[in-house]
Image (cartoon, grey):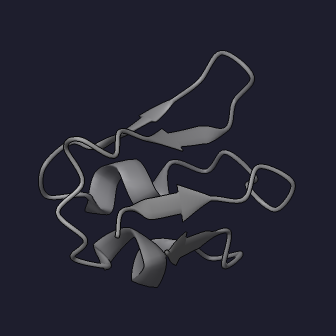
Amino acid sequence: MPAVVNEEKCVGCGACVAACPVGAITMQDNGKAKVDPSTCVDCGACVSACPVEAITLE
């Protein structure tokens, strides 16, 4: 299952964007991260990189 961002927890730091090996995460206009589920390979790198635990693999 692809990674999912909890926008209420996301602080927009971009750590997940830098950690994603396939470029599946982008920052939205509202400053929150967004995962493209069709690109996500479920590796969990973003989950480990997120300092506020805003990302989960579902």
Taking the image as shown, residue 12 lies to the left or right of residue 35, namely right
Q: Please identify the quarter of the rendering in which residue 19 is found.
A: bottom left
Taking the image as shown, residue 4 lies to the left or right of residue 2, namely right
Which quadrant holds the N terminus?
Answer: bottom left
User: 3 or 17: which is nearer to us?
Assistant: 3
Q: Please identify the quarter of the rendering in which residue 3 is found.
A: bottom left
Q: Residue at x 30, y 75 (%)?
A: 45
Q: Residue furthest right?
A: 8
Taking the image as shown, residue 11 lies to the left or right of residue 20, namely right
Query: 57 above or below 4?
Result: below
Query: 44 above or below 14?
Result: below
Residue 57, percent from left and from top? 45, 76
Q: Residue at x 87, y 54 (%)?
A: 8
Residue 33, percent from left and from top? 57, 42
Q: Residue at x 75, y 22 (%)?
A: 30
Q: Residue furthest bottom?
A: 48
User: 28 or 12: which is nearer to us?
Assistant: 28
Q: Residue furthest top?
A: 29
Residue 49, percent from left and from top? 44, 75
Number of disc labels: 0
Residue 44, percent from left and from top? 32, 79
Taking the image as shown, residue 4 lies to the left or right of residue 38, namely right
